[in-house]
Amino acid sequence: MRCDAWAALRADAKLAGEFDRFLAATEARFGAKGMRAFARGGVPEEAKLAPAARAGLAQVGRAVRALRVAERAAAGEARRLAATRRAGQGPRAKM
């Protein structure tokens, strides 16, 4: 399901570009450490914010996390398909 969502997102070049820019801007602002915090479902510790702003940042974190989870799911599926093809078994039909 996540793989399908990721494929649909990447199929629309305009939408994919917006998400790519969002992730790049978020990483530029919060750095790798902040992105790891978002990936864990948290908020960067060094972000000293008022409670209302912290809630908004948590929403940004949820979006980052959802995008990264879908991206990893699609990458994992691609690796599994490639390994299956290399083994000469071909893709298996879903039941």
Image (cartoon, grey):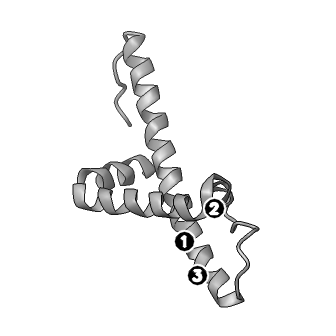
Circle 3 crowding by C-alpha within 10 Å: few under 14, some 14–19, many from 20 = few
Q: Which residue is mark 3?
A: 56
* Kind of residue indicated by mark 2: Phe
User: Alpha carbon of mark 2 to alpha carbon of mark 3: how far?
Assistant: 13 Å
How far across and how far down the image is residue 71, in percent?
46, 47
**Is disc 2 placed on a helix, strand or loop?**
helix
Identify the image quadrant of residue 37.
bottom right
Q: Residue at x 43, y 64 (%)?
A: 22
- Residue furthest toward the front? 28
Q: Is residue 43 above or below residue 24?
A: below
> CB of mark 1 within 8 Å of CB of mark 2?
yes
Residue 38: image x %, image y %?
63, 61
Disc 1 + disc 3, Cβ < 8 Å? yes
Q: Do callouts 2 and 3 mark residues in contact (Cβ within 8 Å)?
A: no
Whole-Å distance between the Cαs marked 1 and 2? 8 Å
* Image quarter hosting the C terminus: top left
Give how far across and how far down residue 53 sits, in percent: 63, 85
Q: Foreground residue, 46 or 73? A: 46
Query: Would you say 8 lies left or right of 20 here?
Result: left
Q: Which residue is mark 1?
A: 60
Image point (75%, 69%), residue name: 46
Q: Position of residue 45 (x, y in %)?
A: 76, 67
Which amino acid lies under the numbered mark 3 shown in the image of this protein?
Gly
Q: Residues within 10 Å of mark 1 (few under 14, many from 20)?
A: some
Q: Is disc 1 placed on a helix, strand or loop?
A: helix
Q: What residue sits right under mark 2 in the picture? A: 38
Q: Residue furthest right?
A: 45
Q: Residue furthest top?
A: 88
Task: Of the two numbered discs 2 and 3 on the same chain, state the one appearing first in sequence.
Answer: 2
